[in-house]
Image: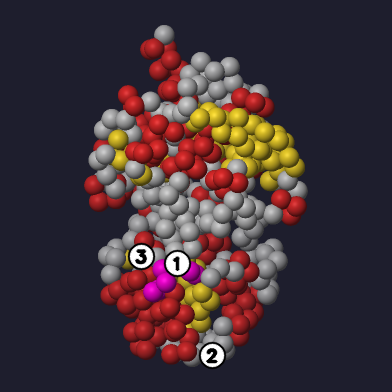
Amino acid sequence: MKSALKIVMLTSECVPYAKTGGLADVVGALPQTLRAMGHDVIVVMPRYGRIDGSKFGLQRHFESMGVWMGNELEWCAVDKGENDGVPVYFIESNKYFERAGLYHDENFNDYSDNPRRFGFLTRAGLQLCRDIGFKADIVHAHDWQTALASAYLRIWHWNDAALGRAASVLTIHNLAYQGKYSAADYDYLGLQWGNFTPDKFEDHGAMNFLKGGIVYADVVNTVSPTYASETRTPELGYGLAPYLNDKGSDYLGILNGIDYAQWNPAQDRLIPANYTAADLSGKAVCKQALQKRFSLQENANTPIVGVISRLVDQKGLHLLAEAIEEIVSNMDVQFVILGSGDKGLEWYFGSLPARYPGQIGAYIGYNNELAHWIEAGSDFFIMPSIYEPCGLNQIYSLKYGTLPIVRATGGLEDTVQQYDEAAGTGTGFKFLQPTASAIYYTVGWAVSTYYDRRHHILQMIRTAMAQDYSWEKSARQYVALYEQAMANKAARDGAAG
């Protein structure tokens, strides 16, 4: 690459400001790595009511910015902050973002005005680029919430002084969430009715943000190579496989990296003791502290299986619920569970410590310190996902020497090396079928290895902790992706001209 790129990231969430999943981690870390490589990156996101401006040092950048939505002129303010050197602009609209949830209410019902909210966010992000004179080479959108950016660039900004040269990249973090809504708000979005067709935005009478974004984007990617392959199939394509296949080599997978400044047992300030692969004594201290904190029987020789997850079917937690009681009844093993989500699963897992005292601990909700404690103090970490675009906790677990037990799907397949019982190699334990019995027998395999082949466990721990999933490799792949998008745009512009 001969020169630095100017990149704007449009997103609905970003750590440390707002997070519901891995999307926030990616948009928090990737721009920082790109900036360290010499690129000029800005992030644009909503100014949610829950964001504490004083805590993050946000300053008012624009008191008033006009954004055309269809035939309506909407107004918003813009605040500005900095995330480890990366400028972050916050679109402030009490009308759209001053509410308790990011996407849905306390009963997990989507806000009815979500199409307007995130259509507005996307248009406002592009307008901001014009108003601050940020002549982007790349507009990088994330998931359905900002997927309309690729269409807006082609429909409204093709000859724009600030955005006319920008190529579009769309990253899909989870294909199941597509932004499919009634067409009642289509006029407001300003996408023109000539584009409301089955090959673009129309989806069985409704409009589909992600579908149109895929069609218009210069390049589309998802967050692991295996998930890219899986989503080309009818089973995991969720109706969009034909459009992804139409992209050909312009749809690919780039594995997420992780932030080792935050997730590294050698320097983690949140855990009871630090440790390395060369000296695991601190991990034993973390295990004892974890057992005490969750009122488990304090026995250094009993393996702990950690769970940190949204308690939803996609994560396979309903399957774990079918298997966990049989596991703890028949095996000398403990579980520590941290998560929230489905109310039925919350009640079920929350009730287990009272019924299996000393064997199961649970915290319903989310606690960042506890997440670090579980990664550090557990011996195994289970992720029985039905599908998993990338997954981050299994990568954290590798660094902490906590061997993953995972279903071989998506990023879990890409990041965990299967245990070879003959050679003692690998970094975890994988199973194929999404069933409770597969979970039972794979946990049994891991537990028996822990008791009967301890030297294999120690060898796997050292191998796991040596894995490198830092953002530098992934960021270089994104730069290549940006160059591919720019070449596609240049070829398209040449053909049009």
Q: Sort mark 3 into few (<14), some (14-19) or many (20+) by Cα contacts within 10 Å.
A: some
Colour mode?
secondary structure
Kindly identify which residue carries mark 3.
313
Position above or below: 17 against 381:
above
> Along the polypeptide, which appears first: circle 3 or circle 2?
2
Q: What residue is rendered at 38% in x and 34% in y?
A: 186
On the image, the x and y values in percent for residue 380 come to 47, 72
Q: What element carries label 1?
A: strand
* The stretch drawn in magenta includes residue 21: no
Residue beneath the point at 41% across and 68% down = 342
Q: Residue furthest top?
A: 497
Amino acid under disc 2: Gln
Which residues are the magenta region? 339-345
| Secondary structure of residue under mark 3 | helix
Which label sits in the foreground, 2 or 1?
1
Q: Which of marks 3 and 2 is in front?
A: 3
Q: Nearer the viewer, residue 32 or 77?
A: 77
Number of the front mark, 1 or 3: 1
- Residue indicated by mark 2: 297
**Where's residue 241, x and y in %?**
28, 41
For mark 1, what is the residue? 341
Amino acid under disc 3 = Asp
Residue 217 visible? The answer is: no
How much space separates mark 1 and mark 3, taking CA atoms?
10 Å
What is the three-letter code of the residue carrying label 1?
Gly
Mark 2 and 1 residues: CB-CB less than 8 Å, in contact? no
Q: In which quarter of the image is the N terminus?
A: top right
Mark 3 and mark 1 in contact (Cβ < 8 Å)? no
